[in-house]
Every structure is written in C-alpha cells, then in structure tokens.
Image: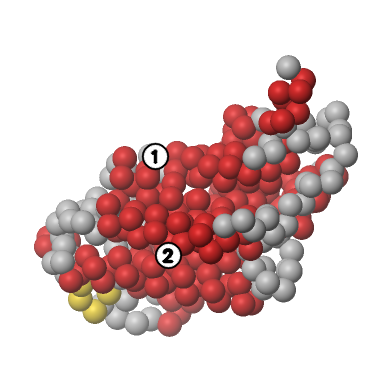
Amino acid sequence: MKEFLDKILRNRKPYTDILIIAALLSVLLVLIGTLLTSIINALIPLKRVFDFFTGDAAVSDFALEYFSFAGIWVVIILTVFIFKKNRKMGNALRYNGEGNSGKGLLIGLLLGFSTNALCVLFSFLMGDIKLSFYGFDIRALLVFIIAVFIQSGAEELSDRFYLYQKLRRRYRSPLVAILGNSFIFAAMHAMNPGFTLIAALQIFTVAVIFSMLVYYYDALWAAMAFHAAWNFTQNIIFGLPNSGIVSAYSIFTLEAASARNGFFYNVNFGVEGSIGSTLILVIIAIAIYLINRGKPEKNDIWKEEPEQESQS
C-alpha cells in the first residue's frame, strides 16, 4: 500500500493538501475575503468614492460588486506569507521576467481580448445579438479596469495560485492540480444566473487554459490578465452578460429584445454559455498542449521538498 501511495503522492503529504480539504479551504478563504471587503465597506465610504468617479449610483454599485473581491487578495496573500510552510508558494506569484512580467501581462491581455472579441464577433455576424454604441466615459472605464482586474485576479489567486499549489505540493501528477482547481472554479459559478452544462464546460475549459499557462510558462500574471481582459471585453466593452451577470455600464449595449440563443451566444449566460466559445477554448487548450508537448513544468516549486509531517 505504501508503495502505491508513494507513486501517487509526493514527499510532502500534509492532510490539508488532500483534494477535498484543499478545495474547501480555498472556498473558505474566498468567503472570508468577501466578508473582509464588507467590513471595509462599512468602515470606509467606498460608495461615495465610486459615485464621484462614475457619476451614477447604479454604475458605482455594480463596480463595487467587482471590488468586493478585494478582500480575497488580502486573505490569500496573508495565508501564504504568514504561515511559514506556505511561503514557498509565493515563488509562483513573484516577478520572473517571463510569464510574470510586463510582457506576460500584455500577452494575457491580448489573448483575453482577442478570444472573447472573436466570440462576440461570430455571435454578431450570425445575428444572435445586436449592439449599439452607448458612450465612452474615461472615469468609469478606469474604475472598471481596476475593479475587473481585482475580481479576476482574486479568482486566479484562489484557484490557479493557492489551490493549484496545494494540490501540486501533494500529488505527483500535475493533472490533479490542473483538473482539480478547474473543476472547483466551474462549481463556484454554479449559482450564477443562467448556468448550464455548456456554461460549466466552457468555464472548466478556460480554467484549464489558465492552469496550463501556470504549468508550462510559470505565468500566473498572464492568467490574471487573460481572465480580466475576457471579463472586461464582454461585460464592459460589449455590454454582454459576464457569467450571467449584466453590467450597469458598457461602451456598447445589447439590444436584449433581439438577442437569441445561437452557436456563439446564450441569452441568459452570454457567449460563455455557448458551444462555439467552448470549442474555441478547447482549440486553444489543445494548441497550448501541442506547442509544449514533451516540455517539463516551467517552475515546479515543490520538486525537491523534503518530507514533512505537518502543514500550517
């Protein structure tokens, strides 16, 4: 039995890195982080600040929904760097001159924007949606650039940073970390409006892509940028639902009455709930795999860890 477990588990085998426990811990940190933001909002009048920049109460309320993820950044980073046994995880977050760099951020932004914009273009050309220009407000855009990155980055910290590294530390096969965090990421969206099986598959697939960026390129920053650009493009630029949630402000607006379900669009969940967007993401995932086939993990930070009996 010991020989069998040694083939599955790495030298470090803390019980908190068991898949189900690690997943529950990552969800717990998200909940604590959200609560922390609520406490901050109660102490600091952030609503007034957002009202000043957006000039619209409804828009600032929506921006605050994105900003509610700020506490997750604080809680996860503190969890990693305060507990001595977790500090090595920080290597995956630090600047490395490659994936975690200005270049990595730019590549991630381009991938996120172009991929989502392509899905929107196809849904527009197929007549599933009609868009009209609403307006361009630089102050509101700056608020949402920051707020959307906070939200997307928080989800990456939770899944592609904390949960991914915990699973990578315990299990020999990287597939456990890649598929495990992707499944939890998809499950966390299950309560969103309009969630369907296709939406779950699409969210799972894009999470696998983000995980592959971390695995092959040590590019957590690029994954954050990809995620943020994807959300910003569909929600703030084109005014389409972001995982079922409609924006209170966007440069273009959707003529909702004319929208219909199609190969690249779902009226309740947006392009993310479509078969077409899922196929595009599957193609991207396959391309990343083929380009890197045979290459080792870019930065396996647990490779030479000695055996430990306990873990904070």
Determine the secondary structure under disc 2: helix
Q: Residue at x 15, y 66 (%)?
A: 126
**Residue picked out by circle 2:** 230
Residue 60 on image: x %, y %: 42, 65
Residue 267 shows up from this direction: yes
- Kind of residue at disc 2: Trp
**Is residue 23 positioned above or below 249 on the image?**
above
**Residue picked out by circle 1:** 190
Q: Residue furthest front?
A: 294
| Cα distance in 3D space between marks 2 and 1 | 19 Å
Q: Is residue 205 left or right of residue 297?
A: left
Q: Quadrant of the N terminus?
A: top right
Residue 181 on image: x %, y %: 56, 43
Q: Quadrant of the C terminus?
A: top right
Q: Residue furthest top?
A: 1
Of mark 2 and mark 1, the one earlier in the sequence is: 1
- Kind of residue at disc 1: Ala
Residue 8 on image: x %, y %: 69, 31
Q: Which is nearer the eye, 109 or 49?
A: 109
Residue 166 shows up from this direction: no
Q: Callout 2: 10 Å neighbours few (<14), some, many (20+)?
A: many
Q: Which is nearer the eye, 48 or 237?
A: 237
Determine the secondary structure under disc 1: loop
